[in-house]
Image: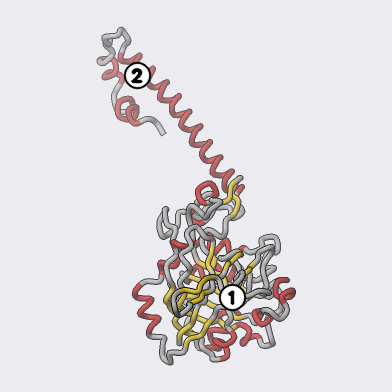
Amino acid sequence: MQPGWLHEDGAKRSDEQAAERDERAPDGVSRRGFLQGGFVAGVAAGVAAGATLAASHQEAHAQAAANPFGRSWWPSPFGPTDEVGASQRVTPAKVLQATQLIKTGRVFQLGRVYEHGIPLFGNRHLSITIPGGPTGGPFGTAKLMYNDEMFSGEIGQVGTQFDGLGHISTIVGTEPVYYNGLKQSEVGGAYGLQKLGVHNVRPFFTRGVLIDVLALKGGDMLPLGYVITPADVQAALARQGTREPGEGDVVLFRTGWGKLWMKDNKKFNEGTPGMGVTVARWLIGRKVCLVAHDHWSGEAVPGEDKDRPFECHQWLIMMNGIHIHENLDMEELAAARAYEFAYVFAPLRLKGATGSPGNPVAVT
C-alpha cells in the first residue's frame, strides 16, 4: 500500500503541475527534491512497517504452533476481562424456569460425605480433627462447652468438588494460559489465585438434566474408559422423554462408577467412563453452564485421545468458562427417575481458591 500523501499529491498531479511547483523552499531544498526525499523515506518506512507486520505474523504463527489447540480461545464471549464464566447464564428467567420444575418438593442430596478414607486423586489429602475436645468451656452457670474442628486438605479438590476457572490451563509457548487468555504470571499466587478465584462464581439455581447412560446401556456400571457418544446422549434423552439441555442448564451424567465409592477406592481411581471431547463440544454448543459426573474425573479416562488426558476440562473450563462438578451421588435421583429438576448449588466464597466443596441438591 502506498502512503496516502503520495496517492493524493503524486498520483493525481501532472508533470506540468509538478514543474510549476518546483520552486525553492526557504531552506534551499526544492519542493520536488523534498517530495523525492519524502518518497524515499516513505518507501523505507513502508518496508520497515512491512517487516514489522511480517514479524508480527511470524510471531502469531509461532504462538499458534506452540499452542496445543492451534488457536487462541480468548477473549471470552462474556467480555475480555470476565472472571465469572458460564455461571452468569443463570439469569432471573432461568431461575423462574427452574421453579416450574418443582412439583413434589422432594430434595435429593447429591454431595458425598467428607470423611476419612474417601478416594483421593494423587497426593491430595483430607483430615478433620478435634484435638483435646471439648475445645472450650465451661462458660457461665449452665457450664456451656463447645467443640471446634481443625480441617486440613485440598478444600476445593477433594470429595464432591466444584472446579473453578482457575483450576485448568495449558502451556502456550512457555507459560500456562487460562480462561480468557489470562497468563500464569497474572493468575498465580502462593496465597490464592490473583484472578479467576472461585469467589467470582455466581450461585446456581437452574434447570438440571440427568442423562442416565447407565440405564440406557444396562449393567452395574459402564466399563472403565467407556466414552459416552453423542448417539448415547440422544438415545438416553429419548428413552427418558427429556428435552435436550439448553442455555444455562446443568447436565449430570450417570455412569454407575460412583458405586465404587468407599467400596473399592483403588478401582475407582484407576480410570473412569464418561463424556469425551465430542460430547463436551456439543454441550458447549448448547451453552450449558455446568457439567457433572458421578466420579472423580469429570470425563472418560482415558478419553478419546490417550495423548491428551483430561481434554474435556480444557474445552469446558479453560476455553469456554463452563464449570465441572465431580463425585456427585446420583443413585437416589436415578432410582426416582427424576430426569429434570431444579439444581441448586453455591460455591463457597473462598477468595483465590481453585474450586469448592459443597453439597449440591436437586429439587423435584
Q: Nearer the viewer, residue 95 or 9?
A: 95
Q: Give the mark, 2 or 1, whose residue is nearer the N terminus.
A: 2
Q: In the image, what residue type sits under mark 1? A: His
Q: Residues within 10 Å of mark 2 (few under 14, many from 20)?
A: some
Residue 89 in view of the camera: yes
Q: Which residue is mark 1?
A: 293
Q: Nearer the viewer, residue 87 or 302?
A: 87
SS at mark 2 in the image: helix
Q: Residue at x 68, y 83 (%)?
A: 221
Give residue 37's position: percent from left, percent from top: 39, 17
Q: Is residue 29 above or below residue 225?
A: above
Q: Is residue 210 above or below residue 177?
A: below
On the rendered structure, is 280 left or right of 76?
right
SS at mark 1 in the image: strand
Q: In the image, what residue type sits under mark 2? A: Leu
Q: Which image quadrant: the C terminus?
A: bottom left
Q: Residue at x 73, y 71 (%)?
A: 270
Give residue 190's position: percent from left, percent from top: 56, 51
Distance from disc 2 to disc 1, alpha carbons, whole Å, reads 71 Å
For the residues labelled 2 and 1, say whether their Cβ atoms are less than 8 Å apart: no
Q: Quadrant of residue 32?
A: top left
Q: Nearer the viewer, residue 224 or 286?
A: 224
